[in-house]
Amino acid sequence: MKSILLTRSNENNKNIIKKLNNYKLQEQEFEYIECPLLEYKNCQLDSSILKEYSNIIITSKYAANIISSWHISEIKGLWIVGNKSQSILQNSRFEIRYVAKNVQDLINNLPSKLYAKSIYLSSNKITQDLPSAIKREIIYQVEYKEYIPEIEKIKKGVDYILLYSQNCASTLLHLLIENNLVSLLLHATIIAISAKVANIVRPFTKNMFYCNSNKPEEMLELLMYDIKFRN
């Protein structure tokens, strides 16, 4: 039985487990070690501020879920990152003006003349800043754990570790070092969502894959491929 360490929020970990259970690998069973390293908390926002802007920028699926439930009288143009956010918002009353592959792609395609008319709705922690002329409002807080959930299970060793963000990778590495468990990375196969995420733990592991598309679905495909290959 292969053990898989899941480091996302509780909700996201449950979704990953559901998807992995749909795979049929010669009756291969998985032991899921749920180790949520982050939690989300929504913030209060005075919606009247949105009247000042004609464009809303979001770069996360969680932000897309938040604004999809808002009741805003004015139609707002959305500049978003990722197909997941697009699917969440495509049936909303917002106009989707651009779907970027990543934050840099969004910056490259957002005309500078729109900066003053745009508002970026984000979490308290982001991996890349937008141009300073764009207004930023924090609509949810991301809090990272100061301890390792399921530490006794982890001490027994894991076969695979899935890392979906730079902050999660940094938090996990810090906690493993703090608990004298960094050798866990040496014996596990790391699957990261991007090269940037992979580079955080690269010095501590021998077995690693990362996505070229930054798509979570590709991570599960890489996982399944490696399990098949090793079997």
Image (cartoon, grey):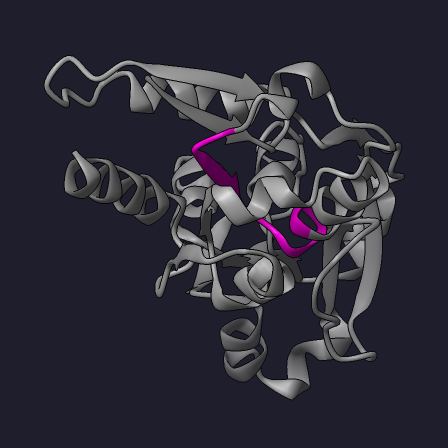
Instruction: Indicate whether 135 appears above or below 182.
Output: below
- Report the side of 60 relative to 209 (left or right): right
Residue 127 in picture, x, y percent from top left: 70, 63
Q: Is residue 163 magenta?
A: yes
Q: Quadrant of residue 159?
A: top left
Tell which of 174 and 24 is nearer to you.
174
Identity of the residue furthest to the bottom in this view: 112
- Residue at the spot x=22%, y=18% of the render? 22
Q: Compared with residue 206, is residue 132 higher up or lower down, i.e. above or below? A: below
Residue at horizontal 65%, vertical 47%? 74
Instruction: Residue 178 in the image: state x and y as whole percent.
Output: 85, 41
Choose between 100 and 33: the one closer to the eye. Answer: 33
Which region shows up in magenta? 158-169
The image quadrant where one finds the C terminus is top left
Quadrant where the N terminus is found in the figure: top left
Of residues 42 and 187, the one nearer the viewer is 187
Q: Is 19 or 183 nearer to us in this picture?
A: 183
